[in-house]
């Protein structure tokens, strides 16, 4: 097999991680896996989105907690550009609400950041091959809490609740962006997500449904 053909047969992989040291480790770790080739590495969802179309990744290793849009919000946007993109989410979280959001998001896998390199490789290979992989700790937490995806999956993320509070304070998108240190595009994305999650067609419905769910006072 010539070098060009061997390179093209490897799984095109993107890393999205805001912590520089962790991102550098993942890049070096991935280089040791013959099945994968790194095509893009980004420190935020917004930065990664600008690379998706050009680099055409097959799978993404993405942090759940990112500045701006979180990992799940990034995947939702990235799949508008590349629907076949598969995702392995990594995080330090074991909170049932966050884990339920991950289940409901449609991503293919999840592992904790303290996982061994061997377990991480196993998870990434499973996701890349079209299977799902959720860590033992993930499954244990979900089982012990008896989390109800139907009732929890619609809850707003922490970032979305922050945006909602400013929307209720009659701030426009530019003002919210300035206050939160985000781009206007990201604020618009959060607002669209809130409307969709709460099945609201306008601001009045958004407020009403948020109050019904106890998301605002």
Image (cartoon, rainbow, N blue to C red):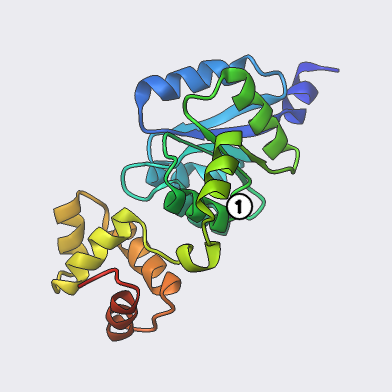
At 18% from the left and 66% from the top, the residue drawn is 166
Q: Quick one: 41 or 120, which is closer to the camera?
A: 120
Residue 31 coordinates in the image, percent (x, y): 60, 17
Q: From where the camera sits, is residue 33 visible?
A: yes
Q: Secondary structure at mark 1?
A: loop
Residue 134: x %, y % from top left: 62, 40
Q: Is residue 116 left or right of residue 152?
A: right
In this rendered view, identify the residue nearer to me: 201 or 90. 90
Q: Is residue 37 above or below residue 190?
A: above
Could you say where residue 23 lies in the image, as x and y percent from the top left? 43, 25
Position of 152 relative to 141 (above/below): below
In the picture provided, is 113 more to the left or to the right than 214? Answer: right
Q: Residue at x 79, y 25 (%)?
A: 5
Please name the residue shown 36% across and 33% down the image. 18
Give neighbour class at mark 1: few <14, some 14-19, many 20+ (Cα, 10 Å).
some
Residue 4 lies, in percent from the top left, at 75, 22
């Amino acid at each position: 097999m010539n070098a060009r053909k061997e390179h093209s047969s490897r799984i095109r992989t993107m890393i999205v991680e805001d912590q520089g040291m962790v991102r550098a480790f993942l890049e070096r770790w991935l280089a040791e896996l013959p099945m994968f080739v790194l095509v893009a590495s980004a420190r935020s969802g917004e930065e990664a989105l600008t690379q998706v179309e050009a680099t055409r990744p097959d799978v993404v290793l993405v942090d759940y907690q990112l500045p701006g849009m979180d990992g799940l919000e990034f995947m939702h946007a990235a799949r508008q550009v590349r629907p076949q993109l598969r995702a392995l989410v990594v995080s330090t979280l074991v909170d049932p609400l966050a884990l339920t959001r991950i289940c409901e998001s449609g991503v293919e896998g999840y592992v904790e950041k303290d996982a061994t390199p061997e377990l991480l490789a196993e998870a990434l290979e499973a996701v890349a091959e079209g299977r799902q992989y959720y860590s033992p700790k993930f499954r244990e937490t979900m089982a012990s809490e008896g989390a109800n995806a139907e009732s929890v999956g619609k809850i707003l993320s922490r970032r979305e609740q922050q945006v909602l509070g400013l929307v209720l304070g009659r701030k426009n998108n530019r003002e919210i962006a300035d206050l939160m240190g985000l781009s206007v595009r990201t604020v618009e994305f959060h607002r669209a997500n809130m409307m969709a999650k709460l099945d609201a067609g306008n601001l009045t419905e958004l407020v009403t449904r948020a109050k019904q769910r106890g998301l605002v006072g």
